[in-house]
Amino acid sequence: QVQLLESGGGLAQEGGSLELSCVASGSVYAMNDMVWYRQGPGQQRELVAAINPNGLRNYANSVRGRFTISRDNSKNTVYLQMNSLELEDAGVYYCNADTVLRYAGYDEYQEVWGQGTLVTVSS
């Protein structure tokens, strides 16, 4: 069973920075796309940033130029550096990953979600 554990959330001032991390544990052979989502109070979950195994990145328009997603494949970890935080960035941030589990003779693909980490931005 693969699990994703997020960390790095907390309280930051408007204009400040936070860095989130998400590490996969369990019998992970490889990670395909890794994605950060967020859900603000009373809002739907939305994609924030995504990165594929080759490092190709995609960002929501609202965070482009302020947030940077990166990954360390050797550690099965994805990061989200958040700079110039705005009040609208507050919410629960979730990590999502397409994982590959390798067994004798076949691979199993499993989409996994983390439990989320809370980001609060104060004025």
Image: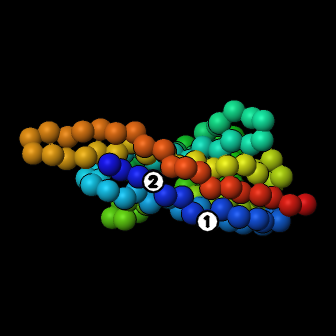
Q: Is residue 58 visible?
A: yes
Instruction: Indicate the amino acid at tag 1.
Output: Gly
Quadrant containing the C terminus in the rendered view: bottom right
Query: Which residue: 83% across, 65% down?
Result: 13
Mark 1 Cα shell of 10 Å, populated few (<14), some (14-19), many (≥20): some
Q: Label 2 crowding class (10 Å Cα cut-off): few <14, some 14-19, many 20+?
A: many
Q: Is residue 119 left or right of residue 115?
A: right
> Residue 39: image x %, image y %?
68, 41
Residue 29 x %, y %? 25, 53
Residue that numbered label 2 is attached to: 4
Q: Residue furthest left?
A: 105
Q: Are marks 2 and 1 in contact (CB under 8 Å)?
A: no
Residue 122: percent from the left, percent from the top? 86, 61
The scheme the figure's colours follow is rainbow
Examine the image and state in which quarter residue 58 appears.
top right
Which is more toward the observer, 16 or 2?
2
Q: Residue at x 49, y 58 (%)?
A: 5
Give the amino acid type for the residue marked by disc 2 in the picture.
Leu
Left or right: 17, with 24 as reference point: right
Residue 79: tell me if it is visible: no
Query: For the point 29% across and 53% down, which residue is it?
Result: 28
User: Which residue is identified by label 1?
Assistant: 8
State the residue lying farthest toward the right: 123
Left or right? Give the position of 1 relative to 89: left
Q: Secondary structure at mark 2?
A: strand
**Number of marks in picture:** 2
Separation (CA) of disc 2 from disc 1 = 13 Å
Residue 115, percent from left and from top? 55, 50
Q: Using the image as rendered, state which of residue 70 and residue 25 is in the foreground.
A: 25
